[in-house]
Amino acid sequence: MNAEILSLKSNLLLSLKKDDTNRSIILAEKILAIRTSDEETTSLLFSLYKKQGNWSIISQLTEKYNLNDADDHDIVLVNTALAKEFYLKKDYGKAIKYTRNACAKEPLFLPALLILIKSYIKKGYKLVAIWKIKRIWKSSPNLLLAEMYNFVYRKANKQKRLKAIKKLYD
């Protein structure tokens, strides 16, 4: 078994040198099928999937190999990317779930927050979206938040929209 792992690892190193991501992934998965506790290979596999942008597999990998202690920023990026995928598929409940996971690690990560707010709006939770925008605005004002706030009031007349925006700035 050790000889097989050594052989797989040397082939993995060769495929990495050749920049053959697909072969590297296959070899890393074979190593992990034999030795599930190989942290170096798990981390490498995580990086390879990240390079490919295969966020759903990264999420599964994170759960399967308990990578919750992975770099927080990586976890935030994975959750935000998954949230965006679900948002584009119009599965706003799952988009909210993944943005909450991202925001648990980095509460002011704007890309995740914007997906969260948009998902709340799409699900009809406009008051929650407004509350979230106001809360974020207090600690980190941003033009994108003002645009989202204006978007929530898009169906209101101009006076109400202007009043709402002024309220945000106060």
Image (tube, grey):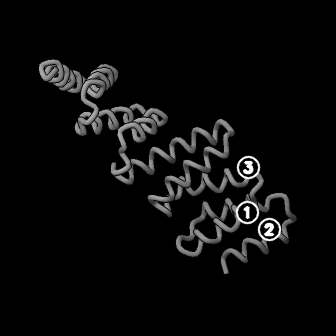
- Circles 2 and 1: CB atoms closer than 8 Å: yes
Q: Classify residue 32 by image quadrant.
A: top left
Q: Residue at x 62, y 63 (%)?
A: 145
In percent of width and height, residue 147 lies at 67, 61
In percent of width and height, residue 82 lies at 53, 41
In percent of width and height, residue 70 lies at 33, 49
- Circles 1 and 3: CB atoms closer than 8 Å: no
The extreme bottom residue here reads 170
Q: Which residue is mark 2?
A: 161
Q: Residue at x 28, y 26 (%)?
A: 28
User: Is label 2 or label 3 in front?
Assistant: 3
- Circles 2 and 3: CB atoms closer than 8 Å: no
For the residue marked with disc 1, what is the amino acid? Asn
For residue 91, above or below residue 111:
above
Q: Which residue is mark 3?
A: 122
For the residue marked with disc 3, what is the amino acid? Lys
Using the image as rendered, state which of residue 30 and residue 132 is in the foreground: 30
The answer to whether residue 13 is seen in the rendering is yes
SS at mark 1 in the image? helix
Q: Earlier in the sequence, mark 1 or mark 3?
A: 3
User: CA gap, disc 1 to disc 3?
Assistant: 15 Å
Q: Residue at x 37, y 43 (%)?
A: 66
- The N terminus appears in which quarter of the rendering? top left
For the residue marked with disc 2, what is the amino acid? Arg
Q: Earlier in the sequence, mark 2 or mark 3?
A: 3
Q: Which mark is residue 150?
A: 1
How packed mark 2 is, by other alpha carbons closer than 10 Å (few <14, some 14-19, many 20 or more), is some
